[in-house]
Amino acid sequence: MWHSVPLTLFWFTYMGSLGIFFPYFSLYLRENAGLSGTQLGMILAIPPLIGMVAQPFWGQVADRTGARGRVLAFLTLGTAAGYLGLGYAQEFGAIVLATAALSVVGTALFPIMISVSLAILRDAGRHAFGHVRAWGTAGFFVLVMGFPWILSLYRSSYSVDAATLAVSQPGLEIMFPVTAAIVLVAALIALFLPKKGMVSVRAARGDWRELLHNRAFLRFLFFALLAHFLLHGPLWFFPLFVRSRGGDLETIRGMWILMLMVEIPLVLSTGSGLKRLGARGLLTLGVIVGGLRWLLCALITDFHLLFAVQALHGVTVVGLNLGSPLYLDTVAPERLRSTAQGILSMVSLGIAGIASNTSAGWLVDRGGTDALYLICGIGSLALGGLARWILPSSKDRSNARADAVLSIDTLA
């Protein structure tokens, strides 16, 4: 369908920007900015802290106004400005302020992206979201591959050399203006997203309270809280883990390439996995495989084996990052889709993210990266084993919701 074209381009472009920022931000803070592990943990805790307020706030704005596409464009433009500002911050205090400013808009962007996407693709079939999301992964892959070339070109053009042996990648600050430029392109694309249909459904004042009485929604939030606490910190500290094993930027890039090569076909097959396992099954699989990955990282020192272990990342992405919005979409009312996604992000990336990042920084300073990955791996495996008892079946609720929609359509 024609309206999925700008949506696909948006995912490709915005996720491409994350292919620069996400793999290298913690490495930049640790080595180029010279922050300690505790300071690094504090910086990484800021986005989820701000997101606890920003995500449900912007979700309510989107649901109450029905202008979800315009809200998404505004947030994307603000995120581009935030990345540019972060590049000018040098000292710890300035980095704190710049990260907080970026987080006001940046943390709310992804849940709004998901709510807009699910609304636009509502009648496009179970494979549609996976296909669009796969293009996002492809964009991430392209920039993971391309950024080292951009960094090398920047170094040679401006004669940037390593100031100390502790800085493995001099000139890494170029990531901020490049990321900002790519996000700006995504903001322009967002202006062409559909503005009518399910994407413009409005919620009435006070409708959000309905979510407080939705037991399936609340149990899912509890599961997401635990899952992201165990998986969030180790993922942000992954560049430091690679460095602890003697790797460099090329090693990090090589591992991400393997992760994405496995992830793309798995994301494309989300529709088939959803049919066979259901959203709850995808969530369970994602958490268990994520725990297995962290456990193996803690126990394995051979680089060849560590490369192979990173292939498990794709299963975790499909299970947790795609299973979560798909499960949530079956238990939350459509008029509250953005609010529900915002609350999910507040809990999973906010509360859990703060606890995970700060405790991860503390563990890295005192026990090393191996202790972090060992504890989180064992915890994730245990949580995955309890998933069926924590989460109600989404299949039954999905069928009930479909019957309700059919009844409404018949009456109309």
Image (cartoon, grey):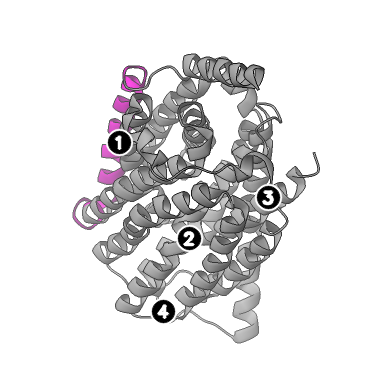
Q: Is residue 131 left or right of residue 364?
A: right
Position of residue 65 measured from the top left corner of the image (x, y, whole percent):
54, 52
The earlier-in-sequence mark between 2 and 1 is: 2
**Crowdedness near tag 3: few (<14), some (14–19) or many (≥20) residues, C-alpha within 10 Å:** some
Please name whichever residue, 6 or 178, is drawn nearer the observer in this view of the structure: 6
Q: Is residue 24 above or below residue 121?
A: below
**Crowdedness near tag 4: few (<14), some (14–19) or many (≥20) residues, C-alpha within 10 Å:** some
Magenta region, main secondary structure: helix
The earlier-in-sequence mark between 2 and 4 is: 4
Q: Residue at 42% across / 72% down in the picture? A: 167
In three-dimensional space, the C-alpha distance between marks 3 and 2, rounded to whole angstroms, equals: 21 Å
Position of residue 369 measured from the top left corner of the image (x, y, whole percent):
30, 50
Labelled disc at residue 89: 4
In three-dimensional space, the C-alpha distance between marks 1 and 3, rounded to whole angstroms, equals: 36 Å
**Which amino acid is tagged 4?**
Ala
The earlier-in-sequence mark between 4 and 1 is: 4
Q: Quadrant of the C terminus?
A: top right
Q: Which residue is mark 2?
A: 106
Task: Tell me the magenta residue range.
Answer: 363-389
The earlier-in-sequence mark between 3 and 4 is: 4
Q: Is residue 174 left or right of residue 126?
A: left
Q: Secondary structure at mark 3?
A: loop
In three-dimensional space, the C-alpha distance between marks 2 and 1, rounded to whole angstroms, equals: 23 Å
Please name whichever residue, 170 or 129, is drawn nearer the observer in this view of the structure: 129
**Which amino acid is tagged 2?**
Gly
- Asked if the stretch drawn in magenta spans residue 376, the answer is yes
Position of residue 73 measured from the top left corner of the image (x, y, whole percent):
61, 60
Q: Nearer the viewer, mark 3 or mark 4?
A: 3
Q: Which residue is mark 3?
A: 195
